[in-house]
Every structure is written in structure tokens, then in C-alpha cells.
Image (tube, helix red, strand yellow):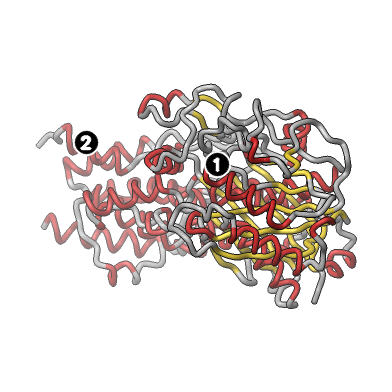
Amino acid sequence: MPISEERTQEITKSLKRCSDASVAAALRFEETHHLDELPAIILGVLERDAANPPATGIAAVADDARLMEDIGMDSFGMIEVVMTAEEVLGITVATEEMSSIRTLGELKQFLSAKLAAKHA
Amino acid sequence: MNRVVVTGLGFVSSIGNDRAAVLDSLREVRSGIEFLPELAAVNDRVKLAGIPKGFEFPTPDPLDWTFPPQVQFSRTQLRTLVPNVAYATMAMEEAISDAKLDPAHVSGPQTGLYCASAGSPWMTQVAMNSVITRGPARTSAPVVITGMPNSLHLNLTARFAIKGASLGFNSACASSSHALGHACDMIRLGRQKIMFVVGAEDCHLHSILPFASLRALSAQSDPALAPRPFDVNRDGFITTGGGAVLVLEDAEHAAARGATVYAEVKGWGQASDGYDVVAPDPTGSGLARAMTNALQDASLAADEIDYINAHGTATNAGDLAELNALKTVFTGDKRPKVSSTKALTGHGLCLAGALEAGICCLALRAGFMPISAKIQELDPACEGVSILTSRCDEAPRIAMSNSSGFGGSSVALIFSRS
């Protein structure tokens, strides 16, 4: 089903200042629900919100990188990432679920599992 | 008691964004007050303000804000920023560099930070509006900081990694003078070696318009006509924003590291009118007691004060109360010269005390007294008080800075040339 203009604007607004590639991935995901769009969306948000993304680009962050210690996410940054995920991906994340996410891999895994359950 | 000296200053103000620019504006009697079309467009009670240059806050999103090149903010710091914190941060950087403090001095257990601002009423409204109308799930979490009255304290202690005492003060327009007095006591008592004293304010519609409701502001459109403290036709104050920082330091500590000293903090005093929630006691009783307490604290006689930087906002009631207080305390043959630099800067509210204390330190070091500008016809009520209306190159040895706030709390600070 094509995405409504209103929903397109909502997603674009939530991803304000994220890369064009991540916005495009989020809009495709809204239509297809293909989980392989997820990494591009997540990296786009981390690139926007992390204090110390690698000089070589956000794509260089490995799955075992710790979000706070290694790329400089702080407590407000983590909340912002989760709020953006809720708005863009249409999920709800409980506060206790957030505390278990420490690495990039865990974040990807957590969101994939949430979305798989939602769209099953 | 330990002696306390001032070893660093930093300014972001309507009359300049560094020490040299502020000193130049004071010497050249250059006003920072300007006509603001956006203000005139929304009301007819206030059209002037004193806005620091080089900063733009076009939306409530800090990522849209621009700053002078001297100050930068990381993505993390931007999240919790409000305009007054941006001003204060730049002034802090200048004061730290002026005092030649290394990172271990700035972020050490013997260094504290006392600050004063009214928060950012603009950002508080944005925060509350979002959390009530969009709901908590769709509101960005940093609003808990940006909406707080002590957002200045929280941001500065984090950015500068302050390890000692840190506190926000609020006594309306006496706030940052209270912060300075209490910071001085911390060093005198040996509880800290260095204290940053910070005053800062936004100067957004949300900060200005409530005072227009109170009819406390001048409705003039011409910056040459307002504010006019001590002029017989004065008609209210004009607000200003910015940040001012003083580095207070234990005198022995400063001497041991070879710091340059602007002035010594000789003493301070405070008192309250106990009279009304907003109007000053017309006799100026609270401010008179504050000045007397300050003289006693400094072990100085009234005739030893050379210059007073008056609170002088240009409201009718405030100026008259201060004149009465001055006449109560200074009765001898030798009386201090008095000026209000708010004629040039505007009234900085919680920023005012630190800004004017900083101006006193600049004036003591440079050996001059800033004049009371914009006076066309001196109020006859000034008789017996020596209002400085023209250039005076006499070098003051001892200066006093007065601050009074709504609710009737007053502070007098005394500085001497080192």
C-alpha cells in the first residue's frame, strides 16, 4: 500500500538531520516491512545522535561496538534513538527493555525481533 | 579569613562579547539598546531590548542555532542547551582563558561554580507545551533540562566538569550578586580556592513581555531615550540578555600561581525591605542596610567609596528608592560618584549583578568611571547624590556595585583596585 503524505512527513520529521539514505530506507520499510532496511535506518539515527561516531564513517561501526563507551551515546541520546525507533518503525519500547541494549548488534537484534513479532 | 581576588572576567553582552569590547563601549558611551521590529509587532508597551550579537535562535531546536566562532557545542551539549547557557558558556571560556586556569584548576575539588538565571521561559514553554499536548512518549527527553529554571547550573557543571560546590541562586534581579557574595564567603571560609560566578539570561519575548504587563518597561522606540536611569523623564527599564563570568580566587592561591588580579573583593552585604512583593520600600531601607552591612564587612567608611555602580534600572519607584538609600548611607563631605551602566547595557535581570560587578572590576583595572548615559534632565531628587553625567578620568580606588530585586532583596558588593 502506498504511504500517505502525512505518514511520509511524520517519518521525515522524526529522521530530521539523518542521511538521505536512512530516510529512503525508512520510507521503503514503511511500505515493504523488509527487515534488511533496518541497519541503514539505525546507522542513520546513530550517526545523528552519537557524540563520537568513527572518523571513517558510521558504517565502520562493528556490531560488537558499545553504544555508550565506543561511539559516545549518552543517556539522552539513547532515549532519543528509542523514541525515533518508536515513531519511525511504529513500535513501543518499554523502559526495562532499553536497559538490556548495550551494543549495536543488540540494538539491531532487539528491533528485528520486535518488528518480526509485529509483522508476523 | 582568606582574602578573595578577581582573576578572570568573561562577557557576552549587548555592549560587546569580550572584555575589550565592553570596556570600549563603556569608555565611548556606546549603547547596546536597539529597536526590535519583532517586539514592536506583538505589542505597544515595549519595543527596545539589548541583544548580544553573533547568536541566532530562529527555532526552539538547538541544532538550528548559530553561535560566534569562539564557542562550539557538541551534539550532546546541544541537546540540553538554552540561549542563556550559550551566552554563559562563551563568557566562561573567556574567563577561564583570562584567568589562565588549566583544566585541573577548572575541574578540581577546590573549584566551585555559583550561578544565576531565570532559566529560559521560552524553552520552558516549548517543553511544557510538548509534554502536555503531544504527550511524554512523543516529547524529546532533554526538555526535562531545558524546561528547568536551573538549566544554567546543570549545563555548566556538566560541560566544565565542576567538582566543587555548585548551586543556582534566585532572588530576582539581585540573583547573581547574591551568587557572588556567597561565592566570596566560600573562599573566605577556606571551603574552596576558586569560584566561578555566572549570571546569564535569555532576552526572548517570553523573558521581556511579562515585565510589560507589569508596566515596568519603557515604551520608547528611540534607543537614545531609554532606559534613562536618574533622568526626570525616565519611564521604565529595558531588558538585556547575555552572560557574565567572574573568577573569584583565594588571594594566596592566585599569588602562588602568578595570576593577574583585577580587584580584591573587600566585602559584601545583603538585606531585605520586608515591604512588598514587587515595589521597593520608597525609603530604600533594605538597600541602605545592604550597603551599610557591606561597608562593615569590608571594614571601610562610607567616604572611602569612590564609585558606585547603581542598580538604577530607570523605573520611577526603583530609582527613587535607591537615591534615598544612597542619601541615607553617604552623608559626609566626600561622596562617591554614582552611575547606572544599565543605560548602555539594559537591565540583565539575574545577569545584572555579575555583569555590573564585572564592569566595576574592568573600571578599577582601567582606572576610570563609566558615566550614567542618556540623561537629558537630571531628576532633582538626585540632589546630594553625585550622578556621573560626563566623562571622568579620575581613577577609582574602591567601587561598590548595587543590586535590588523584586520582593525587596538587595545586595551591595565592594571591590578595591589591587
* Residue that mark 1 sits on: B241
Secondary structure under the numbered disc 2 in the rendered image: helix
Among the 4 quarters of the image, the one containing residue B251: bottom right
The label on residue B104 is: none
Question: For the point 74% across and 61% down, which residue is it?
Answer: B248
Q: Is residue B127 left or right of residue B321?
A: left
Q: Residue at x 57, y 33 (%)?
A: B227
Q: Which mark is residue A8?
A: 2
Q: Residue at x 60, y 65 (%)?
A: B271
Q: Are marks 2 and 1 on the same chain?
A: no
Left or right position of A10 against B58: left
The subunit letter for the residue under badge 1 reads: B
| Residue B314 picture location, percent across and down | 57, 39
Across and down, in percent, residue B400 comes to 74, 54
**Chain letter for the residue marked with disc 2 in the picture:** A
- Amino acid on which the number 1 mark rests in the picture: Gly
Seen in the image, is A116 located left or right of residue B163?
Answer: left
The answer to which image quadrant residue B144 occupies is: bottom left
Q: As displayed, is residue B191 above or below residue B269?
A: below
